[in-house]
Image (spheres, rainbow, N blue to C red):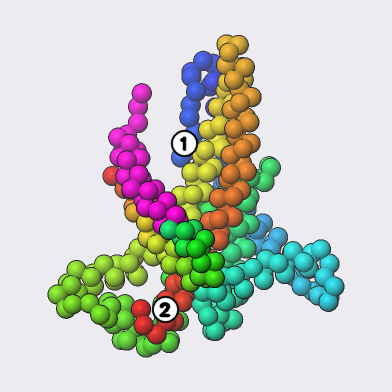
Amino acid sequence: MEGTLNLVGFGLSAIGPAIATGMIFAAYINGVARQPEARSVLQPIAFLGFALAEALALFGLVLAFVL
Amino acid sequence: MLALVLSGAEGDGFVPPGTKDFNLPPIIEGVEWFTKPVLLVMVSVVLLSVFFILSARKAAVVPSKFQFVGESIYGFVRNDLAKEIIGHEFMRFVPYLFTLFVFILTNNIFGIVPFLQFPSMSHVAFPYVLAAFTFFVFHYVGVRKHGLIKYLKDIAFIPGVPKPVYILLTPIELATFFLVRPLTLSLRLFANMFAGHLLLLVFILGGEYMMNDSHLIMKLFAPFSFLFGIALTFFEFMVQCLQAYIFTLLTALYIAGALADEH
Protein backbone atom coordinates (compact mmCIF):
# COMPACT_ATOMS: atom_id res chain seq x y z
CA MET A 1 0.00 0.00 0.00
CA GLU A 2 1.24 3.40 -0.88
CA GLY A 3 -0.28 6.77 -1.41
CA THR A 4 -0.80 9.94 0.48
CA LEU A 5 -2.94 10.79 3.49
CA ASN A 6 -3.89 14.03 1.72
CA LEU A 7 -6.49 12.16 -0.26
CA VAL A 8 -8.05 10.73 2.90
CA GLY A 9 -8.20 14.27 4.23
CA PHE A 10 -9.83 15.43 1.03
CA GLY A 11 -12.39 12.66 1.33
CA LEU A 12 -13.24 13.79 4.85
CA SER A 13 -13.38 17.44 3.87
CA ALA A 14 -15.73 16.65 0.98
CA ILE A 15 -18.40 15.44 3.41
CA GLY A 16 -19.30 18.97 4.47
CA PRO A 17 -19.86 20.45 0.99
CA ALA A 18 -21.67 17.26 -0.03
CA ILE A 19 -24.22 17.66 2.76
CA ALA A 20 -24.44 21.39 2.06
CA THR A 21 -25.14 20.83 -1.64
CA GLY A 22 -27.79 18.28 -0.77
CA MET A 23 -29.49 20.68 1.63
CA ILE A 24 -29.41 23.54 -0.88
CA PHE A 25 -31.09 21.53 -3.60
CA ALA A 26 -33.53 19.95 -1.14
CA ALA A 27 -34.62 23.44 -0.16
CA TYR A 28 -34.81 24.47 -3.81
CA ILE A 29 -36.96 21.48 -4.75
CA ASN A 30 -39.17 22.10 -1.73
CA GLY A 31 -39.64 25.70 -2.72
CA VAL A 32 -40.48 24.90 -6.33
CA ALA A 33 -42.84 22.11 -5.28
CA ARG A 34 -44.73 24.47 -3.01
CA GLN A 35 -44.80 27.33 -5.45
CA PRO A 36 -43.91 26.35 -9.03
CA GLU A 37 -44.02 29.93 -10.32
CA ALA A 38 -41.15 30.85 -7.96
CA ARG A 39 -38.78 28.67 -10.00
CA SER A 40 -37.09 31.46 -11.94
CA VAL A 41 -36.53 33.44 -8.73
CA LEU A 42 -35.16 30.50 -6.78
CA GLN A 43 -32.94 29.01 -9.50
CA PRO A 44 -30.15 31.63 -9.49
CA ILE A 45 -30.10 31.70 -5.70
CA ALA A 46 -29.88 27.92 -5.49
CA PHE A 47 -27.07 27.74 -8.03
CA LEU A 48 -25.11 30.58 -6.42
CA GLY A 49 -25.35 28.79 -3.09
CA PHE A 50 -24.35 25.52 -4.72
CA ALA A 51 -21.35 27.19 -6.37
CA LEU A 52 -20.27 28.63 -3.05
CA ALA A 53 -20.60 25.30 -1.23
CA GLU A 54 -18.78 23.42 -3.96
CA ALA A 55 -15.99 26.00 -3.86
CA LEU A 56 -15.03 24.60 -0.46
CA ALA A 57 -14.81 21.07 -1.85
CA LEU A 58 -12.65 22.37 -4.70
CA PHE A 59 -10.30 24.09 -2.25
CA GLY A 60 -9.95 20.72 -0.57
CA LEU A 61 -9.17 19.07 -3.89
CA VAL A 62 -6.52 21.66 -4.76
CA LEU A 63 -4.91 21.44 -1.34
CA ALA A 64 -4.87 17.66 -1.52
CA PHE A 65 -2.69 17.88 -4.60
CA VAL A 66 -0.62 20.91 -3.66
CA LEU A 67 0.35 20.13 -0.07
CA MET B 1 -2.97 1.59 -22.02
CA LEU B 2 -1.02 -1.10 -23.82
CA ALA B 3 1.71 -0.91 -21.23
CA LEU B 4 -0.83 -1.44 -18.49
CA VAL B 5 -2.18 -4.56 -20.11
CA LEU B 6 1.30 -5.93 -20.69
CA SER B 7 2.40 -5.30 -17.13
CA GLY B 8 -0.79 -7.00 -15.95
CA ALA B 9 0.00 -10.06 -18.04
CA GLU B 10 3.43 -10.34 -16.50
CA GLY B 11 1.87 -10.63 -13.06
CA ASP B 12 2.95 -7.25 -11.73
CA GLY B 13 -0.51 -6.70 -10.32
CA PHE B 14 -3.00 -4.10 -11.40
CA VAL B 15 -1.58 -0.62 -11.96
CA PRO B 16 -4.42 1.81 -11.21
CA PRO B 17 -4.78 4.67 -13.70
CA GLY B 18 -3.55 8.02 -12.45
CA THR B 19 -2.50 11.47 -13.56
CA LYS B 20 0.06 9.92 -15.92
CA ASP B 21 -2.77 8.76 -18.16
CA PHE B 22 -3.61 12.38 -18.89
CA ASN B 23 -0.14 13.31 -20.12
CA LEU B 24 -0.45 12.06 -23.67
CA PRO B 25 2.54 12.07 -26.00
CA PRO B 26 2.66 14.62 -28.87
CA ILE B 27 0.89 13.46 -32.03
CA ILE B 28 3.70 14.59 -34.33
CA GLU B 29 7.18 13.71 -33.13
CA GLY B 30 9.08 16.79 -32.01
CA VAL B 31 6.11 19.20 -31.83
CA GLU B 32 5.72 19.30 -28.07
CA TRP B 33 2.54 21.37 -27.78
CA PHE B 34 0.49 19.44 -30.34
CA THR B 35 -1.15 16.76 -28.17
CA LYS B 36 -4.53 15.06 -28.27
CA PRO B 37 -6.48 17.67 -26.24
CA VAL B 38 -5.12 20.46 -28.46
CA LEU B 39 -6.21 18.54 -31.54
CA LEU B 40 -9.64 17.91 -30.00
CA VAL B 41 -10.15 21.60 -29.25
CA MET B 42 -9.28 22.43 -32.85
CA VAL B 43 -11.63 19.74 -34.13
CA SER B 44 -14.41 21.05 -31.89
CA VAL B 45 -14.00 24.59 -33.25
CA VAL B 46 -14.18 23.37 -36.85
CA LEU B 47 -17.13 21.05 -36.10
CA LEU B 48 -19.12 23.75 -34.33
CA SER B 49 -18.44 26.38 -36.99
CA VAL B 50 -19.45 24.07 -39.83
CA PHE B 51 -22.52 22.80 -38.01
CA PHE B 52 -23.94 26.17 -37.05
CA ILE B 53 -23.11 27.86 -40.35
CA LEU B 54 -24.82 25.03 -42.22
CA SER B 55 -27.83 24.99 -39.90
CA ALA B 56 -28.31 28.77 -40.09
CA ARG B 57 -27.56 29.35 -43.76
CA LYS B 58 -30.69 27.86 -45.26
CA ALA B 59 -32.96 29.16 -42.53
CA ALA B 60 -36.56 28.47 -43.49
CA VAL B 61 -39.95 28.89 -41.86
CA VAL B 62 -40.33 25.13 -41.83
CA PRO B 63 -36.97 24.13 -40.38
CA SER B 64 -34.87 21.19 -41.56
CA LYS B 65 -33.60 18.71 -38.95
CA PHE B 66 -30.26 20.53 -38.90
CA GLN B 67 -31.85 23.89 -38.36
CA PHE B 68 -34.13 22.50 -35.69
CA VAL B 69 -31.25 21.17 -33.58
CA GLY B 70 -29.24 24.35 -33.95
CA GLU B 71 -32.18 26.56 -33.08
CA SER B 72 -33.16 24.40 -30.10
CA ILE B 73 -29.74 24.82 -28.50
CA TYR B 74 -29.69 28.52 -29.30
CA GLY B 75 -33.21 28.98 -27.94
CA PHE B 76 -32.31 27.14 -24.77
CA VAL B 77 -29.32 29.38 -24.05
CA ARG B 78 -31.13 32.57 -25.02
CA ASN B 79 -34.44 32.01 -23.24
CA ASP B 80 -33.69 29.74 -20.32
CA LEU B 81 -30.27 31.09 -19.40
CA ALA B 82 -29.72 34.64 -20.63
CA LYS B 83 -33.26 36.03 -20.55
CA GLU B 84 -34.21 34.47 -17.22
CA ILE B 85 -31.12 35.58 -15.37
CA ILE B 86 -29.70 38.73 -16.94
CA GLY B 87 -33.02 40.45 -17.66
CA HIS B 88 -33.77 43.13 -20.22
CA GLU B 89 -30.15 43.70 -21.33
CA PHE B 90 -29.61 40.01 -22.09
CA MET B 91 -29.29 40.20 -25.88
CA ARG B 92 -25.76 41.66 -25.73
CA PHE B 93 -24.46 38.59 -23.91
CA VAL B 94 -26.22 35.84 -25.83
CA PRO B 95 -23.36 35.37 -28.37
CA TYR B 96 -20.79 34.92 -25.63
CA LEU B 97 -22.97 32.62 -23.52
CA PHE B 98 -23.97 30.56 -26.52
CA THR B 99 -20.39 30.11 -27.72
CA LEU B 100 -19.30 29.19 -24.22
CA PHE B 101 -22.07 26.63 -23.82
CA VAL B 102 -21.63 24.79 -27.12
CA PHE B 103 -17.83 24.88 -26.90
CA ILE B 104 -17.72 23.37 -23.41
CA LEU B 105 -20.47 20.89 -24.23
CA THR B 106 -18.70 19.61 -27.35
CA ASN B 107 -15.35 19.32 -25.63
CA ASN B 108 -16.89 17.51 -22.68
CA ILE B 109 -18.80 15.07 -24.83
CA PHE B 110 -15.56 14.15 -26.62
CA GLY B 111 -14.88 12.25 -23.40
CA ILE B 112 -17.41 9.56 -24.30
CA VAL B 113 -17.32 9.62 -28.10
CA PRO B 114 -15.75 6.33 -29.24
CA PHE B 115 -12.17 6.62 -30.57
CA LEU B 116 -11.81 10.20 -29.32
CA GLN B 117 -12.58 9.40 -25.67
CA PHE B 118 -10.74 12.23 -24.05
CA PRO B 119 -12.44 15.26 -22.51
CA SER B 120 -10.16 18.14 -23.44
CA MET B 121 -11.38 20.08 -20.40
CA SER B 122 -9.61 17.54 -18.19
CA HIS B 123 -6.47 19.55 -18.93
CA VAL B 124 -6.73 22.48 -16.58
CA ALA B 125 -5.33 25.05 -19.03
CA PHE B 126 -8.51 25.16 -21.13
CA PRO B 127 -10.92 25.88 -18.24
CA TYR B 128 -8.46 28.51 -16.99
CA VAL B 129 -8.69 30.38 -20.29
CA LEU B 130 -12.49 30.17 -20.36
CA ALA B 131 -12.75 31.37 -16.77
CA ALA B 132 -10.38 34.24 -17.58
CA PHE B 133 -12.71 35.32 -20.41
CA THR B 134 -15.69 35.25 -18.05
CA PHE B 135 -13.69 37.12 -15.40
CA PHE B 136 -12.86 39.95 -17.80
CA VAL B 137 -16.35 40.07 -19.28
CA PHE B 138 -18.23 40.46 -16.03
CA HIS B 139 -15.80 42.95 -14.52
CA TYR B 140 -15.75 44.91 -17.77
CA VAL B 141 -19.53 45.25 -17.95
CA GLY B 142 -19.64 46.14 -14.25
CA VAL B 143 -17.04 48.89 -14.65
CA ARG B 144 -18.72 50.17 -17.81
CA LYS B 145 -22.09 50.32 -16.11
CA HIS B 146 -21.18 51.82 -12.74
CA GLY B 147 -17.74 53.37 -13.20
CA LEU B 148 -14.63 51.93 -11.59
CA ILE B 149 -14.90 53.59 -8.18
CA LYS B 150 -18.57 52.86 -7.60
CA TYR B 151 -18.22 49.30 -8.88
CA LEU B 152 -15.38 48.52 -6.47
CA LYS B 153 -17.22 50.24 -3.64
CA ASP B 154 -20.32 48.16 -4.34
CA ILE B 155 -18.26 44.99 -4.19
CA ALA B 156 -16.29 45.85 -1.07
CA PHE B 157 -18.99 47.49 1.04
CA ILE B 158 -22.34 45.75 1.06
CA PRO B 159 -25.02 48.18 2.27
CA GLY B 160 -27.01 47.52 5.41
CA VAL B 161 -24.23 46.05 7.52
CA PRO B 162 -22.94 47.46 10.85
CA LYS B 163 -19.64 49.32 10.33
CA PRO B 164 -17.29 47.06 12.37
CA VAL B 165 -18.36 44.01 10.37
CA TYR B 166 -16.67 45.51 7.29
CA ILE B 167 -13.29 44.55 8.77
CA LEU B 168 -14.31 40.95 8.30
CA LEU B 169 -16.59 41.24 5.30
CA THR B 170 -14.59 43.43 2.92
CA PRO B 171 -11.61 41.06 2.49
CA ILE B 172 -13.98 38.13 2.00
CA GLU B 173 -16.02 39.97 -0.61
CA LEU B 174 -12.94 41.15 -2.50
CA ALA B 175 -11.46 37.66 -2.46
CA THR B 176 -14.76 36.22 -3.66
CA PHE B 177 -14.97 38.51 -6.65
CA PHE B 178 -11.34 38.52 -7.75
CA LEU B 179 -9.99 35.16 -6.68
CA VAL B 180 -12.62 32.60 -5.73
CA ARG B 181 -14.99 33.15 -8.65
CA PRO B 182 -12.61 32.59 -11.58
CA LEU B 183 -10.73 29.88 -9.72
CA THR B 184 -13.76 27.81 -8.75
CA LEU B 185 -15.36 28.31 -12.15
CA SER B 186 -12.39 26.72 -13.90
CA LEU B 187 -11.57 24.13 -11.26
CA ARG B 188 -15.15 22.87 -11.07
CA LEU B 189 -15.17 22.08 -14.77
CA PHE B 190 -11.67 20.63 -14.71
CA ALA B 191 -12.21 18.49 -11.61
CA ASN B 192 -15.46 17.02 -12.90
CA MET B 193 -13.99 16.09 -16.27
CA PHE B 194 -10.79 14.76 -14.72
CA ALA B 195 -12.54 12.65 -12.12
CA GLY B 196 -15.09 11.35 -14.63
CA HIS B 197 -12.43 10.24 -17.09
CA LEU B 198 -10.44 8.59 -14.30
CA LEU B 199 -13.56 6.76 -13.12
CA LEU B 200 -14.17 5.33 -16.58
CA LEU B 201 -10.51 4.34 -16.89
CA VAL B 202 -10.64 2.47 -13.58
CA PHE B 203 -13.60 0.34 -14.58
CA ILE B 204 -12.64 -0.33 -18.20
CA LEU B 205 -8.94 -1.01 -17.52
CA GLY B 206 -9.86 -2.94 -14.40
CA GLY B 207 -12.21 -5.14 -16.43
CA GLU B 208 -9.51 -5.63 -19.04
CA TYR B 209 -7.04 -6.71 -16.37
CA MET B 210 -9.52 -9.10 -14.77
CA MET B 211 -10.27 -10.68 -18.13
CA ASN B 212 -6.57 -11.32 -18.78
CA ASP B 213 -6.04 -12.77 -15.32
CA SER B 214 -5.38 -16.49 -15.05
CA HIS B 215 -7.91 -17.13 -12.27
CA LEU B 216 -11.33 -18.23 -13.47
CA ILE B 217 -13.18 -16.27 -10.80
CA MET B 218 -11.53 -13.04 -11.99
CA LYS B 219 -12.62 -13.76 -15.57
CA LEU B 220 -16.16 -14.37 -14.32
CA PHE B 221 -16.37 -10.98 -12.68
CA ALA B 222 -14.83 -9.02 -15.56
CA PRO B 223 -18.18 -8.49 -17.40
CA PHE B 224 -19.59 -6.76 -14.32
CA SER B 225 -16.76 -4.29 -14.40
CA PHE B 226 -17.47 -3.57 -18.07
CA LEU B 227 -21.21 -3.25 -17.40
CA PHE B 228 -20.55 -0.78 -14.65
CA GLY B 229 -18.23 1.09 -17.01
CA ILE B 230 -21.05 1.37 -19.55
CA ALA B 231 -23.50 2.56 -16.89
CA LEU B 232 -20.97 5.16 -15.75
CA THR B 233 -20.54 6.32 -19.35
CA PHE B 234 -24.20 7.36 -19.36
CA PHE B 235 -23.73 8.98 -15.98
CA GLU B 236 -20.73 10.83 -17.41
CA PHE B 237 -22.87 12.08 -20.29
CA MET B 238 -25.24 13.62 -17.76
CA VAL B 239 -22.39 15.20 -15.80
CA GLN B 240 -20.84 16.60 -18.98
CA CYS B 241 -24.07 18.32 -20.02
CA LEU B 242 -24.61 19.55 -16.48
CA GLN B 243 -21.13 21.04 -16.22
CA ALA B 244 -21.50 22.94 -19.50
CA TYR B 245 -24.83 24.23 -18.21
CA ILE B 246 -23.45 25.25 -14.82
CA PHE B 247 -20.47 27.07 -16.32
CA THR B 248 -22.76 29.09 -18.58
CA LEU B 249 -25.30 29.65 -15.83
CA LEU B 250 -22.69 30.97 -13.42
CA THR B 251 -21.25 33.23 -16.11
CA ALA B 252 -24.74 34.65 -16.65
CA LEU B 253 -25.21 35.03 -12.90
CA TYR B 254 -21.93 36.90 -12.51
CA ILE B 255 -22.79 39.20 -15.41
CA ALA B 256 -26.23 39.82 -13.90
CA GLY B 257 -24.60 40.60 -10.54
CA ALA B 258 -22.22 43.08 -12.13
CA LEU B 259 -25.09 44.79 -13.96
CA ALA B 260 -27.41 44.94 -10.94
CA ASP B 261 -27.93 48.35 -9.37
CA GLU B 262 -27.25 47.21 -5.84
CA HIS B 263 -25.39 44.08 -4.80
Which quadrant of the view contains residue B48? bottom right
Residue in the picture at 43% in, 86% down? B144
Q: Position of residue B207 (x, y in %)?
A: 59, 26
Front: mark 2 or 1: 2
* Residue kind at label 2, given as amino acid type: Ala
Residue in the picture at 50% in, 63% down? A34
Which quadrant of the view contains residue B4? top right
Position of residue A30 relative to residue B202, above or below, is: below
Q: Which mark is residue B137?
A: none
Residue in the picture at 16% in, 78% down? B163
Front residue of B203/A65: it is: B203
- Label 2 marks a residue whose chain is B
- Label 1 marks a residue whose chain is B
How far apart, in angstroms, are the residues tagged by discs 2 and 1? 40 Å
Q: Position of residue B77 (x, y in %)?
A: 61, 69
Which segment is the magenta one?
A1-26
Task: State the residue position of label 2.
Answer: B258
Q: Main secondary structure of the magenta part?
A: helix
Task: State the residue position of label 1.
Answer: B18
Q: Are marks 2 and 1 on the same chain?
A: yes
Residue A5 in magenta? yes
Q: The residue tagged with tag 2: helix, strand or loop?
A: helix
Residue in the picture at 52% in, 49% down? B193
Q: Earlier in the sequence, mark 2 or mark 1?
A: 1
Residue B224 in magenta? no
Is B258 left, or right, of B46 in this rendering? left
